[in-house]
Structures are given as structure tokens and as C-alpha cells.
Amino acid sequence: MSNKDTVTAFVEAMRRSDVETLSSMITEDFSWWIAGKQAYLQTAGEHDRAFFLGFFGSGGEMFPNGADFAVTGMVAEGNKVAAEAHMTATTATGSEYNNMYHFLFEIADGRIKRMKEYMDTHHAKVTFGL
């Protein structure tokens, strides 16, 4: 599987909040960095494997009707993949979520070692009250 294929499958597993698949696709020392300041957005900053899996474990609660989340473009070089993605969903409270993302993935031995996430932090804060 190419690094691009790995990232595509990973984003699909995030869309489904498939924690079992996500767990199998990340390294034991996986890290997840989200853009922003924690004083503004609670989820901003550096997170470990346990936080990531816990976050996606609650994904069904956030989006009870599921989400449309898909990669719209990718560039790969060496062990890094830059991916653009778009997500739309209706939240559990009935709010519409519509956000664009840019991810930088670092791959090690076919698994995701690091994920850096950039998105509209204001939209996330307003929509989820984070």
C-alpha cells in the first residue's frame, strides 16, 4: 500500500470513527497536533495516541447521522503526505459543520506516526463550543 493509500484509508476510518482500524493504523508513539491555542480551542496542541483514539471513540456522539469526510488532494514525498480534506456533517445538537482541513502525515513502516491538523479553528469552536 502506498503512503497516499494509507492516508486515504486513515481519513475514511476517521470518517467512520472506526477506532479499531485507526488503532491498527497508528504507531505506539503516535502524536496528533491540532492548530490553535488551547486558551481559545480546547483541542488545540499536542496529543498522544490515547487522546486520539478516545476522541474518535466519541465520534458517533458528535455526528449521530455520520459525516462526509473525504480527501480532496494529496502530495507525497518520502515518508510524508500532505492531504487536503473537506468535512460536512450535522452535529448532535443540529448545527451544520462544514470545514476544510490540511493534514501533514508522517508515515513509519506503513503506519501513521504523526498527524498535524490545520483547519478553521473558529468554526470548530463555534460549532462545538470547545
Image (cartoon, helix red, strand yellow):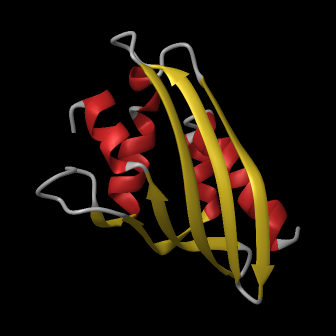
Tell me: 45 left or right of 85.
left
Image label count: 0
Query: What x and y, as percent, mark residue 71?
Result: 73, 50
Asked if residue 67 is positioned above or below residue 86 in the image, the reply reads above
Query: What x and y, as percent, mark residue 128?
Result: 29, 30
Tell me: 94 left or right of 25.
left
Residue 78 position by quadrant: bottom right
> Which residue is at the front of the view, 94 or 9?
94
Residue that extends furthest to the top in the rendered view of this protein: 94
Residue that extends furthest to the left in the rendered view of this protein: 39
Quadrant in the picture for the C terminus: top left
Quadrant in the picture for the N terminus: bottom right
Tell me: 40 left or right of 53.
left
Residue that extends furthest to the bottom in the rendered view of this protein: 78
Residue at 81% across, 66% down: 4
Asked if residue 72 is positioned above or below residue 94 in the image, the reply reads below
Residue that extends furthest to the right in the rendered view of this protein: 1
Residue at 77% across, 86% down: 77
> Which residue is at the front of the view, 37 or 3?
37
Query: What x and y, as percent, mark residue 61?
Result: 39, 21
Asked if residue 127 is positioned above or below residue 23 in the image, the reply reads above
Tell me: 83 left or right of 63.
right
Residue 27 position by quadrant: bottom right
Residue at 36% across, 64% down: 35
Query: What x and y, as percent, mark residue 97?
Result: 47, 27
> Which residue is at the front of the view, 34 or 127?
127
Residue at 54% across, 23% down: 89
